[in-house]
Amino acid sequence: MRKTILMLVCILSLALASCGEKGPSTEINVTLTDFQFTPNAFIVPAGQEITVSIVNTGAVVHNFIIMKLGATAGDTYDDDDAVNIFWEEIDIQPGGDISVSFIAPTEPGEYQIICRTEGHIASGMIGKLVVVGE
């Protein structure tokens, strides 16, 4: 009986722990593949320095672009979208990797992440950066 109760408590604890959403982090680790960011959602603290480590395992050049709060690129990226970029790391070559930093937006909210390589937004290569206050 004790073993059964202990096992149920362990299973319940693991289930509850896996349900919780990760808290904010000052580190983003992302892999770029063809038409996908993995993972595709990140939670960061407002106004903090964020380190981004990017690996491109895809067959083409990819980009990691964070749009301004409330801005989206729609189905395609064009020159008009440039004014709506909050931060970008462009031209990560196939097989390449990079580690860079930026200061997170100070305004909490959800920011769109895109790859501006032609056809990638329409194919679903989008993500989100969730900025949370302190």
Image (cartoon, grey):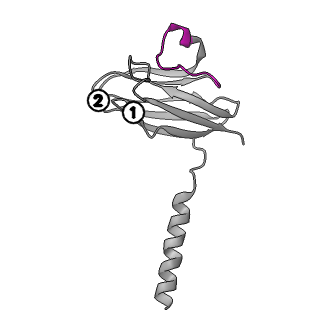
Q: Nearer the viewer, residue 39 or 51?
A: 39
Circle 2 residue:
95
Q: Which mark is residue 76?
A: none
Q: Which residues are magenta?
A: 69-82
On the image, the x and y values in percent for residue 132 come to 67, 39
Q: Mark 1 belongs to which amino acid?
A: Gln
Residue at point 49%, 72% (across, down): 11
Query: Is residue 76 inside the magenta stretch?
Result: yes
Residue 36: give its label.
1
- Figure quadrant of residue 123: top left
Q: Is residue 23 above or below residue 45?
A: below
**Residue at x 29%, y 29% (from the top left corner):** 95
- Asked whether 19 or 94 is in front, the reply is 19
| Residue for point 60% across, 33% down | 49
Amino acid marked by disc 2: Gly
Dot 1 lies on which element? strand
Measure how far apart labels 2 and 1 are at the Cα level. Answer: 15 Å
**Which residue is depicted at the point 48% across and 20% down?**
75
Mark 2 or mark 1, which has the lower sequence index?
Answer: 1
**Residue, far bottom:** 1
Give the overall secondary structure of the magenta segment: loop
In the picture, measured across the screen, residue 13 lies left or right of residue 106, that is left
In the rendered image, residue 3, in percent from the top left (x then y), is placed at 46, 87
SS of the residue under disc 2 = loop
Q: What crowding class fits label 2: few (fewer than 14 Cα within 10 Å), some (14-19), or many (20 or more)?
A: some
Residue 112 is covered by the magenta coloring: no
